[in-house]
Image: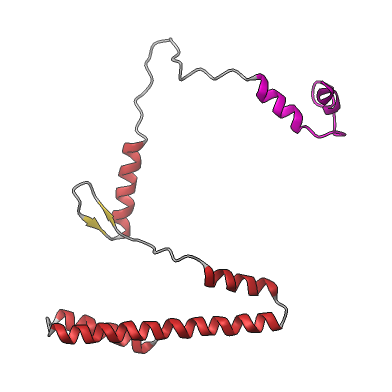
Amino acid sequence: MSDETLALIEKRLNIRLSNADPDQMEKVNNKIKRSCGKNKNEHISKICTELDRHANENRSTELYSKVKYLSREFKAKTQIIKDEQGNVITDAKGIAKMWREYCCRLFHDEPPPASGNRTQLDQKPAILRDEVGRAVKKLRNQKALGSDGITAEVFNLG
């Protein structure tokens, strides 16, 4: 942003704090929008000049990185979160605290029962024949023997 745009934003803040005329506020807002648009166009023009220079100098890595930068999708970085009561939290420590509490609630598990019976969730599933078949097909030929002394070629033959 240019110094002119920053000065306009400062002026708008002073107008807002002084509760001045809404028409004056609207005029300053429009000036800020025009100035931001002008700044954006200057920035894009500068990048296009760099693109042209990179293309002329056969610097394809820089050229493609600038094209990627220009064509990327804008993703706003939000620094706002609401707590359980709907209050807006904007400070970093408060946001971190809310996420910590949320994750603690989300992943809070009850301890398993003390009895010696294993539940169905504790048992691991059996290895399926198809899983073994897919793993064997992925083995590469002409590699060192396994711990059992059998080569991958023997497995692949069937």
Of residues 23 and 149, the one nearer the viewer is 23
What residue lies at 16% left-to-right and 85% top-to-bottom?
Answer: 23
What residue lies at 43% left-to-right and 10% top-to-bottom?
Answer: 116
Of residues 148 and 42, the one nearer the viewer is 42
Q: Indicate the colouring scheme.
A: secondary structure
Instruction: Find out whether residue 98 is within the magenta segment.
Output: no
What residue lies at 75% left-to-right and 27% top-to-bottom?
Answer: 136
Q: Is residue 7 above or below residue 134?
A: below
Q: Position of residue 49 (x, y in %)?
A: 58, 85
Q: Position of residue 85 (x, y in %)?
A: 18, 48
Determine whether, in the image, residue 72 is placed left or right of residue 16: right
Determine whether, in the image, residue 22 is placed left or right of residue 40: left
What residue lies at 47% left-to-right and 19% top-to-bottom?
Answer: 122
Rendering quarter of residue 131: top right
Q: Is residue 114 above or below residue 58?
A: above
Q: Which residues are magenta?
A: 129-158
Q: Position of residue 10 (x, y in %)?
A: 26, 83
